[in-house]
Image (cartoon, helix red, strand yellow):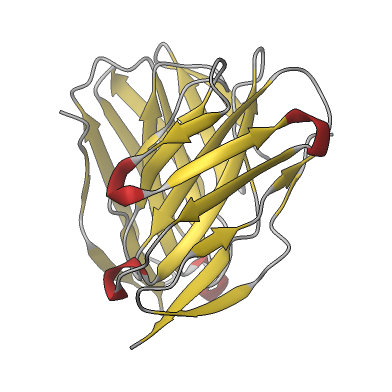
Amino acid sequence: AQSVTQPDIHITVSEGASLELRCNYSYGATPYLFWYVQSPGQGLQLLLKYFSGDTLVQGIKGFEAEFKRSQSSFNLRKPSVHWSDAAEYFCAVGYQGAQKLVFGQGTRLTINP
Amino acid sequence: DTEVTQTPKHLVMGMTNKKSLKCEQHMGHRAMYWYKQKAKKPPELMFVYSYEKLSINESVPSRFSPECPNSSLLNLHLHALQPEDSALYLCASSQGGGFYEQYFGPGTRLTVT
């Protein structure tokens, strides 16, 4: 069965520092990869997605992610975080022929002033 | 427009009440989803509607009854809920299939007393 692992439950970074959130997926058919962000009590907002092509994808709010097939990873990065980036981040994977996404457990991001 | 709307925003109900959650999208999406999310957990898929037909029921108890009156609307009827059903209920829509991104509504915070 497909699965998604986000190894870091909680990450704390200082405002202005760089950020990398890790995501690994289980091997399967060609994956379709997504990163979502959720502020407390809110719905999930799509940050970016990877379907094919260039393995470095740009998203909203200054985020980017790199797909590495050899490592089954899709890590999210941001060069300089802002206090407003504090939230829960979910990685998700979909597959052609499937009707649903598989979500990771999430990484909670805290920003130190 | 990538908006999914949900009403109500908050709902408190007793265990003998009957209530409904509503979801609406006007993106022309053919798939709609109900998720349940507990605190500090990823969304948990409940139901998937594809072309207005129920295509996935993730073994959800019958006290939850979904309905898709048309391609833009999705309801979740609630009856005889338990306190453990208290959660954030999220609606989402997509073009259909696991390789399309899902757009989420802001959710309904449900409390069962």
Residue A36 visible in rendering: yes
Taking depth in this image into account, of A106 and B16 the one nearest to the observer is A106
Q: In the image, residue B107 lies at what x, y percent?
A: 32, 55
B81 left or right of A40 in image: right
Taking depth in this image into account, of B113 and A50 the one nearest to the observer is A50
Q: In the image, residue A26 lies at what x, y percent?
A: 82, 37
Q: Height in image: B62 above or below B52?
A: below
The quadrant where residue B12 appears: bottom left
Q: In the image, residue A44 lies at what x, y percent?
A: 38, 50
The quadrant where residue B68 appears: top left
Q: Height in image: A2 above or below B82?
A: above
For image coordinates 84% across by 30% down, the residue present is A27
For image coordinates 48% across by 72% down, the residue present is A109
A43 left or right of B86 in image: left
Residue furthest to the left in view is B1
For image coordinates 26% across by 39% down, the residue present is B23
